[in-house]
């Protein structure tokens, strides 16, 4: 009689679990469908946005460029005659420096060692996509810079690549908005009145910096007004795409881990980025240099007006060279792919907690810096290879290979070195998760995930031996 009652209880519990699983599956499907349509609408919006800003740019390009040459010529001529010339140049060059690679890469490294991997990976997308898009379009347009037109009057700038769109504007808008988005992505900033005020202050602060950088590019004669506006609008669109469509920062540890190790993700990343690189090579091969190129080379980059530059830093070569930074994002993804697969096969570590490797005491975070730098050793090729070699060799060994190795090294070797010396989240070592057995729902990453119950139900739903596992759980409870 007692056995019969136990069997009935077991059957009832099975039915309850199955009903819960079915309800969850229905709700999960509805959520997926809702997310699909929401993302689809956002993708449509961003496509329309880019079509509009690219289309209207042709309308205001020439009028604003001509006006900019006049304005910048008058400003720099008057400054040259004043006693404040040195102060003017120092101040605006310092402001302009805030939009350069040295600042943005340093910011990335800080985010990399202090934030979860999905955050730094997303920020790296902002850094590389903004640089790629800007330089890709520079090769297509091949538009002059203002000081190329009046080099004697607009005398401060000495940039070798084409001017449209402004890389400083694109990069500063995309990266500084990305930075403040990451800095304020906490409940405190979104659910408390005081935090929300601080969030607004941060946004205002960084928007002021962005505007100052854009103004500096005009006053220094490096860009025209239309080039700065266009770069800023491109950066805004990229920021929206990265943080509201890709939005890796909203992924739980489990979601991000599984997304990276999926072979379909590897295929998509490979196809998209390889296609972009091939398109870039075709455009670079077909595009001819601006008609002012020879004049600029002989009269501006002659060692008197501006320092002589290697050929890869001039005109379309400069744009194509810098667009090869796209290999950095390919390397970073491959690095994460290798890291997560290594963790998955190595039963000493928990992969979900590797995503949140940053969670440790601050003094250990400092020790990550040298290991991450060592991991990104491939970037050394950029500095040691001389710039007077053939362009094809430079494109491969001074750009593509260093970016690829640096991205791969920092996300695979850099993180792995830090794990070996134990300057990371201690839960990586104590809460092992069996990836080959979906019944084990005790991943330490679940304590951090906001949707742990949903993930546990997913594990049950994916189990091929569902009946046996339910029986075992009920027997253990009894």
Image (tube, rainbow, N blue to C red):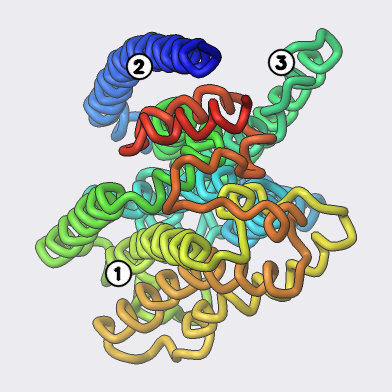
Relative horizontal placement of residue 120, taking residue 204 as reference (left or right): left
Q: Quadrant of residue 388?
A: bottom left
The one nearer the camera, 367 or 156, is 367
x, y percent for residue 208: 69, 29
For numbered disc 2, what is the local secondary structure?
helix
Task: Please name the residue that numbered disc 2 is placed on.
Answer: 25
| Distance from Cα at disc 2 to Cα at disc 3 | 30 Å
Q: Is residue 379 visible?
A: yes
For numbered disc 3, what is the local secondary structure?
helix
Mark toward the start of the polypeptide (2 vs 1): 2
* Circles 2, 3 touching at the beta carbon (< 8 Å): no
For numbered disc 1, what is the local secondary structure?
helix
Residue lying at 24% horizontally and 30% vertically, measured from the top left: 58
x, y percent for residue 82: 76, 49
Task: Please name the residue that numbered disc 1 is placed on.
Answer: 317
Task: Please name the residue that numbered disc 3 is placed on.
Answer: 190
Q: Quadrant of residue 177?
A: top right
Taking the view exactly as shown, the residue that stands out farthest to the front is: 1
Q: Badge 1: few (under 14), some or many (20 or more) residues near its Cα, within 10 Å?
A: many
Residue lying at 89% horizontally and 60% vertically, measured from the top left: 363
């Amino acid at each position: 009689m007692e056995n019969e009652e136990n069997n009935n209880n077991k059957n009832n519990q099975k039915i309850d679990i199955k009903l819960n699983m079915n309800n969850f599956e229905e709700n999960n499907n509805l959520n997926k469908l809702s997310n699909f349509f929401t993302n689809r609408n956002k993708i449509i919006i961003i496509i329309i946005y880019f079509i509009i800003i690219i289309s209207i740019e042709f309308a205001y390009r020439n009028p604003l460029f001509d006006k900019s040459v006049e304005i910048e010529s008058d400003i720099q001529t008057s400054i040259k005659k004043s006693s404040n010339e040195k102060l003017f140049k120092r101040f605006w060059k310092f402001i302009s420096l805030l939009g350069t690679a040295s600042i943005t890469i340093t910011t990335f490294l800080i985010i990399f060692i202090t934030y979860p991997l999905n955050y730094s990976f997303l920020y790296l997308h902002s850094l590389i996509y903004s640089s790629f898009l800007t330089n890709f379009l520079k090769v297509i347009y091949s538009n002059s810079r203002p000081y190329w037109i009046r080099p004697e009057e607009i005398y401060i700038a000495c940039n070798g690549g084409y001017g449209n769109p402004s890389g400083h504007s694109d990069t500063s808008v995309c990266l500084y908005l990305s930075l403040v988005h990451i800095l304020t992505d906490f409940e405190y900033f979104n659910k408390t009145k005081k935090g929300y005020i601080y969030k607004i202050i941060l946004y205002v602060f960084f928007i002021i910096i962005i505007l100052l950088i854009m103004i500096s590019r005009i006053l220094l004669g490096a860009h025209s007004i239309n080039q700065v506006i266009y770069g800023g609008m491109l950066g805004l669109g990229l920021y929206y795409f990265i943080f509201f469509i890709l939005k890796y920062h909203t992924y739980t540890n489990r979601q991000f881990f599984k997304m990276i190790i999926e072979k379909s993700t590897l295929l998509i990343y490979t196809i998209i980025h390889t296609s972009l690189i091939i398109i870039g090579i075709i455009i670079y091969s077909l595009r001819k240099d601006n008609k002012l190129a020879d004049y600029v080379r002989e009269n501006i980059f002659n060692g008197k007006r501006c320092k002589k530059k290697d050929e890869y830093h001039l005109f379309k070569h400069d744009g194509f060279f810098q667009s090869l930074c796209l290999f950095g994002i390919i390397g970073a993804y491959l690095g994460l792919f290798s890291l997560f697969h290594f963790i998955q096969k190595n039963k000493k570590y928990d992969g979900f907690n590797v995503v949140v490797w940053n969670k440790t005491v601050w003094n250990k975070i400092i020790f990550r810096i040298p290991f991450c730098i060592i991991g990104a050793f491939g970037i050394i090729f950029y500095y040691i290879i001389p710039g007077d070699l053939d362009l094809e060799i430079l494109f491969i060994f001074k750009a593509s290979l260093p970016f690829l190795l640096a991205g791969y090294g920092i996300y695979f070797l850099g993180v792995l070195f830090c794990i070996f010396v134990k300057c990371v989240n201690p839960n990586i070592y104590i809460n092992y998760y069996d990836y080959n057995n979906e019944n084990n729902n005790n991943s330490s990453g679940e304590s951090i995930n906001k949707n742990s119950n949903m993930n546990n139900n997913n594990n049950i739903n994916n189990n091929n031996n569902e009946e046996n596992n339910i029986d075992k759980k009920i027997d253990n409870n009894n």
